[in-house]
Image (tube, rainbow, N blue to C red):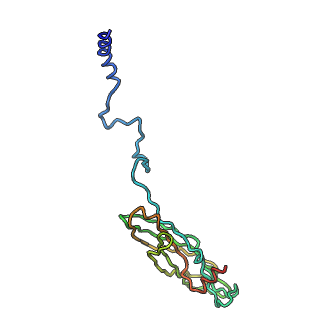
Amino acid sequence: MKNKFNRLIILLLPVFLTGCETVSDLSMPNLGMPDLTKYSLNPFSKDEVIPCPNAMILADAVSLNEFSSYASPDESDLIHKARIETITYECSYEDLQVKGNLYISGSVALGQKGASGSKNLPIFVALVKNNTDVTNRKFINIKADMPEGGTLLRFDHVVKDFEFYVDSVEDISLYEILTGFNLNSEQLGYNRDQ
């Protein structure tokens, strides 16, 4: 009986082995797996997209209210009112350097004491780590030209090549970019009272 079983295995062995074949031709498509080169995102890739630090506007410095007198600021004493509306940071990474452009948009409205012409809008940009440590800061002056007869204008400004270094790529989530108007104490007090 054992002998018949061995003969049967020897006879059927070529049939079983022809069912198993290996593909050595690399031009043959892999029918069990999609071609991942056709997709921009490879789920098996170790490369992770690292987001840029969040860019935010400091609440107390979102607006600049210029009055002729801050003793008792009133709308009738308003020269102009500026407001930062949006801020975005688009960046790239190379080793431990983060570099990108910071886009700031806002508006300026003339008050009753205002006049057309050039308006200087002092703005700060600060890089903050762990919500407390200011590691980098920059002060810029945006010039906005109010046309003759105009009372409202939009401004767009790009801070080019705003860059900083990190200790490791994992540290990027610890950073945020804060911006706002560089206010004097009277302007800051007015904003906080509103």
Residue drawn at x 48%, y 80% as measured from the top left: 139
Horizontal side of 93 relative to 7 (left or right) equals right
Give the farthest residue toward the front.
2
On the question of residue 189 being in view, the answer is: yes
Residue 153 in percent (x, y) is at: 60, 77
Q: Which of 173 and 148 is in front in this view?
A: 173
Horizontal side of 55 relative to 3 (left or right) equals right
Residue 78 in percent (x, y) is at: 66, 86
Against 58, is 114 above or below? below
Against 85, is 38 above or below? above
On the question of residue 150 being in view, the answer is: no
Query: Which of the image's four quarters has the N terminus?
Result: top left
Q: How many marks?
A: 0
Residue drawn at x 44%, y 73% as measured from the top left: 160
Residue 116 in percent (x, y) is at: 61, 85
Residue 141 in percent (x, y) is at: 50, 82
Task: Please identify the quarter of the rendering in which residue 185 is found.
Answer: bottom right
Q: Nearer the viewer, residue 12 or 21?
A: 12
Query: Which of the image's four quarters has the C terminus?
Result: bottom right
Task: Please identify the quarter of the rendering in which residue 6 is found.
Answer: top left
Against 194, is 68 above or below? below
Q: Nearer the viewer, residue 70 or 25?
A: 70
